[in-house]
Amino acid sequence: MKTLQDQIGDVIEKEPVALFMKGTPEMVMCGNSMRALNALHAAGAPITTVDILPDPRIRQELSAISGWPTIPQVFVQGELVGGADITEELLESGELQRKLDEALGADRAQDVKVVALELD
Amino acid sequence: MEADTIRALLEQAFPDAAELDVEDRTGGGDHFQVTVASPAFDGLSLLDQHRRVNDALAAMLQDGSIHELRIKTKGTA
């Protein structure tokens, strides 16, 4: 089994848009995770979510990789975009859509996918 | 008061701030909205601006005394 660090790194690097959040899109457990999820939906992003709640080590490893202390965290093609506040601000300014258009094309898929990390 | 501690940390990190506001969003002393406008942000991306605020409050984020933090930053240029 891959380490948590490697699994998290894989999601960040391989998923077009990764959202590390509290809960899942079906059951969001935090207002800020909801704000980030809604902003990504509004921008027409494909979204791959990872729930950080099942184990505190997920959040520790994630923050160690990203250097970002809080949840949620949004990545586009391996690059940290920010948390809920930045994602919302970039949506309002149109920059989030531009970033997605550049990275993934204007007629991108908009699937929502949930990745569960393997815990030992 | 956590809000006063946050304000003091931000004033220390951004002594030139043109605007600095800390709001206890719920009254419970652990959900905060901070607003900082500072020349220190000029030329920085939004991501790096927020990093500077997170860095200033790192200890309080780490020990859980800030449960939720909303950040609004602006340069002054």
Image (cartoon, rainbow, N blue to C red):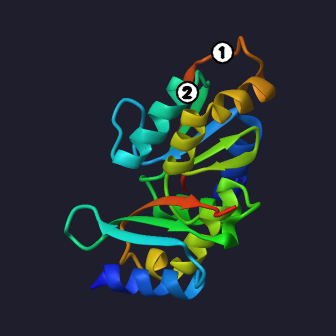
Furthest residue toward top = A107
User: The C terminus of chain A lies in which quarter of the figure?
Assistant: bottom right
Q: Is residue B53 above or below residue A110?
A: below
Q: Residue at x 76, y 44 (%)?
A: A78
> Which residue is more in the foreground, A41 or A117?
A41
- Tell me which amino acid carries mark 2: Lys
- Provide residue A60's location: percent of width, then percent of height: 56, 66
Front disc: 1 or 2: 1
Label 2: state its secondary structure.
Answer: strand
State whether residue A118 appears in this view: no
Which residue bears the numbered disc 1? A109
Instruction: Let me know if marks 1 and 2 both belong to one chain.
Output: yes
The residue carrying pointer 2 sits among few (fewer than 14), some (14 to 19) or many (20 or more) residues within 10 Å by Cα, namely some
Q: Residue A15 in the image: x percent, y percent? A: 70, 34
Q: Residue at x 61, y 70 (%)?
A: B38
* Spot occupied by residue A20 in the image (x, y as percentages of width and height): 54, 46
Q: Where is A40 relative to A116, above or below? A: above
Cα separation, mark 1 vs mark 2, equals 12 Å
A117 with respect to B22 (left or right): right
Work out whether residue A40 can be spotted.
Answer: yes
Question: Which residue corresponds to the image point at 22% horizontal and 62% vertical from the top-left?
Answer: B26
Identify residue type, mark 1.
Ala
| Mark 1 burial class by Cα count in 10 Å: few <14, some 14-19, many 20+ | few
Q: Indicate the chain on which mark 2 is placed.
A: A
Q: Which residue is mark 2?
A: A113
Q: Is residue B60 left or right of residue A30?
A: right
Contact (Cβ within 8 Å) of mark 1 with mark 2: no
User: Percent from the top left, x then y, of residue A26?
Assistant: 36, 29
